[in-house]
Amino acid sequence: MLLAIDGPAGSGKTTLAAKLQSEYQPTLTVQVIHMDDLYNGWEHALSEELTLKLSEIVQAHKAGKDFYIKRFNWITMEYGEAELIQSTKVLILEGVGAAQKIVRDAGAKTYWIETPPEIGLQRVLDRDGYHLRDLMLIWQSYQDVHFKVDKTAENCDVKLTS
């Protein structure tokens, strides 16, 4: 089973991923992958590089194979060593860009969580710190362009608001 949870920053994607993980985990193996771990910094996060990584991940999952990811370190601004992700029954992709077309086309059940930009921004700043305000304002424009081009919200299976 492949699930993807998408929506603007601060909408509650991580919270929903944790809830779904706890619901499935008693009887199935579950892995959650956060898009924050796959992004290549702020400016290149929602790029073709992310799409290629997601394609590799979903293809390995569908084939029941283990795969490797390199998690991005937001302090050093570089990727760490490759980490083995073992095959699981349920894979949850969570974050901005998680439910993009390549993932939808792979048969994922997709979730879209909507929240007003000002509320999402406030939640992120409360969680991660006000020093990120300027970067988050730019990020909101990046995500908006991505969502518009990809038509993510219009194409998700489940639509929620927070």
Image: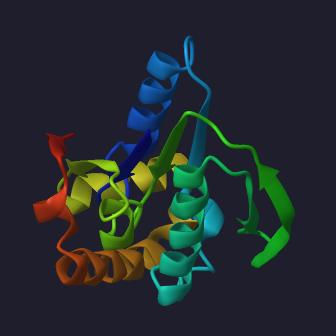
86 sits left or right of 51 in the view: right
Q: Please identify the residue farthest to the top as the structure is shown.
A: 26
41 sits left or right of 104 in the view: right
Count of numbered tags:
0
Quarter assignment of residue 16:
top left
95 is higher (above) or lower (below) than 3 = below
Location of residue 29 in the rendering, given as x and y in whole percent from the top left corner: 62, 27
Question: The N terminus appears in which quarter of the rendering?
Answer: top left
Q: What residue lies at 17% left-to-right and 56% top-to-bottom?
A: 116
Question: The C terminus appears in which quarter of the rendering?
Answer: top left
Q: What residue lies at 62% left-to-right and 46% top-to-bottom?
A: 64
Location of residue 85 in the rendering, given as x and y in whole percent from the top left corner: 74, 49
Quarter assignment of residue 118:
bottom left
6 sits left or right of 158 in the view: right
User: 8 or 98: nearer the eye?
Assistant: 98
Q: Please identify the residue farthest to the right as the structure is shown.
A: 81
Q: What residue lies at 51% left-to-right and 59% top-to-bottom?
A: 58
Location of residue 42 in the rendering, given as x and y in whole percent from the top left corner: 55, 80
User: 25 or 106: nearer the eye?
Assistant: 106
3 is higher (above) or lower (below) than 46 = above
User: 158 or 19: nearer the eye?
Assistant: 158
